[in-house]
Amino acid sequence: MKVYKKIMDILGYLESAIQVIIGILITVIAFANVCVRYLSNGKLAYTEELTVNIFVLMIMCGCALCARTGSLISLSLLFDISGKKGKKILAVLFTLFSIAFYAVIVYTGWDKTATLLHQHKLTASLLIPEGYFMAALPLGGILLILHSIEYMIDILTEQAPCMKDPEPKQKEVSEG
């Protein structure tokens, strides 16, 4: 488990770095487009296409990073009121359901990517194969699966923050 966690730490670091690079890239591209529109009546046609497609990769990586810490939006009522044993059982069930869903994303994303690459279909303004951008979907699905498993392991080994016993609150001493 320690090797898996170390690999996932490295992967998480790389994903975070990619998030920063993508965020900077999207900001620069959007700013350049605004400047061009303000200074002329034209626009950079490729900027919208590039921004949207890169944003998909950013969203998928961001979701995977959230899955790593259990931060994806969820209905956690049952989980929150359960004891440690119940949380472990629910974590396994939730992870299995999530992996099934992410596997569908990987399968359908890969199928669409392969189809687009096979058809040699190009983007409208950049003339880059559409399959390159579509590959963000199965890649993100794989990352989601890996990080969901990592979070489940953290819960089962009681390393996840939700498994720690809350620290008792100290009473405040009032002056006076």
Image (cartoon, helix red, strand yellow):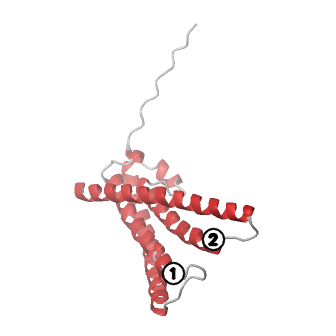
- Tell me the SS state at disc 1: loop
Q: Position of residue 25 (x, y in %)?
A: 53, 61
Q: Position of residue 10 (x, y in %)?
A: 32, 56
Q: Residues within 10 Å of mark 1 (few under 14, many from 20)?
A: few
Residue 147, above or below 83: below
The answer to whether residue 97 of the structure is visible from this angle is no
Position of residue 157 in the picture relative to residue 116 (left or right): left
**Circles 1 and 2 in contact, beta carbons < 8 Å:** no
**Farthest residue, direction bottom:** 119
**Farthest residue, direction front:** 39
- Label 2, on which residue? 48
- Residue drawn at (47%, 58%) of the image: 21
- Label 1, on which residue? 128
For badge 1, the amino acid type reads: Ile
Q: Nearer the viewer, residue 89 or 98?
A: 98
Position of residue 123 in the picture relative to residue 40 (left or right): left
Q: Quadrant of residue 35?
A: bottom right
- Residue drawn at (50%, 58%) of the image: 72
Q: Nearer the viewer, residue 112 or 32?
A: 32
For badge 2, the amino acid type reads: Glu
The answer to whether residue 37 of the structure is visible from this angle is yes
Of the numbered discs 1 and 2, the one sitting upstream in the chain is: 2
Q: Nearer the viewer, residue 121 or 137?
A: 121
Q: How far apart are the alpha carbons under marks 1 and 2? A: 14 Å
The C terminus sits in image quarter: top right
- Residue drawn at (44%, 75%) of the image: 138
- Tell me the SS state at disc 2: helix
Q: Nearer the viewer, residue 129 or 92?
A: 129
Q: Position of residue 28 (x, y in %)?
A: 58, 59
Q: Quadrant of residue 95?
A: bottom left
**Farthest residue, direction top:** 176
